[in-house]
Amino acid sequence: MEEPTQGETMPQRGPQASAQTEPLRGPYVYEYPRPAVTVDIVLFAFLDHRLQVLLVRRRKAPFADHWALPGGFVGIREGLEEAALRELEEETGVHDVYLEQLYTFGDPDRDPRGRVITVAYFGLVSADQVARMRIRGGDDAAEARWWDVYHLPPLAFDHDRIIAYALRRLRWKLEWTALGFLLLPEEFTLSELQVVYETVLNEPLDKRNFRRKILAAAIVEETGRYRQGEHRPAKLYRFAARAVELERARRRSP
């Protein structure tokens, strides 16, 4: 959503716009400065053996034609997650994804227009989900596309810092939870799983140790099927239902 300049009100869109933009009224006079609040969304996917992040190219100043995270201003009567899901769909066409709150970034100089605090959200989608998506730039985003997280263009605002923080969170979660089920298809080989781990962690892993640790953690199980290839057939695995449900419970917890 295009951000308002000083003295302007938020532009109205859609049937719920008045509920989002109508000022809160009451008997009190607020004596303190009120910074603006935005949301930014870091959406990761594992595509073509690369960890990628969804970015938009800004249509207007500040940072016109720079790439940035999808996001925008929160309506006065709008919840934070509601705003994040709305902005993601408006600017990229992506909807029906799970987001969790990542961190709040509030450096006083992070936005040249004034005091703006942003609440970042973080999400993962599988290649199967991406194949069903119709990514396109919309609203004040001239373009939307996936970028290799290790080869990003110059970014607007402090979005390089936000992506770096999200990548650290992803690495931690991947090592200690079954979060990888969100990045892989339903069935996969252990070699494919290792490639995901190596790409996210950005370091090579010993094949024997990796397989031993993954199998000992009981987060994956054999499907009984094999994938044929040039060499010997490779066993197919899936994430264990118990591990997936435990991760989903973690995500549902505040």
Image (cartoon, rainbow, N blue to C red):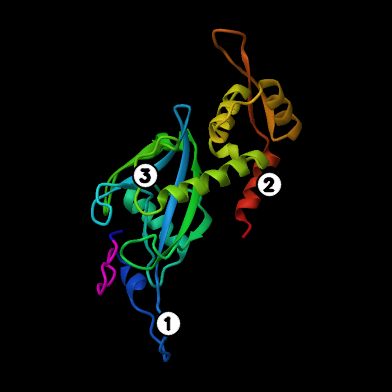
Q: Which residue is depicted at the point 26% across and 68% down?
A: 5
Give the amino acid at mark 1.
Tyr
In the foreground, 246 or 108:
108
Q: Which residue is mark 3?
A: 55
Q: Which residue is mark 2?
A: 246
Q: Which residue is mark 1?
A: 32
Q: Earlier in the sequence, mark 2 or mark 1?
A: 1
Give the secondary structure at mark 2: helix
Give the secondary structure at mark 3: strand
* C-alpha span from label 2 to label 1: 43 Å
In the foreground, 253 or 30:
30
Q: Quadrant of residue 108?
A: bottom left
Quadrant location, the N terminus? bottom left
Give the amino acid at mark 3.
Leu
* C-alpha span from label 3 to label 2: 30 Å
Q: Earlier in the sequence, mark 3 or mark 1?
A: 1
Give the secondary structure at mark 1: loop
| Magenta range | 3-13
Q: Which residue is depicted at the point 59% across and 41% down?
A: 171
Between disc 3 and disc 2, the foreground one is 3
In the foreground, 184 or 198:
198
Q: Which residue is depicted at the point 50% across and 52% down?
A: 99
Rendering coords of residue 9 (x, y %): 27, 72
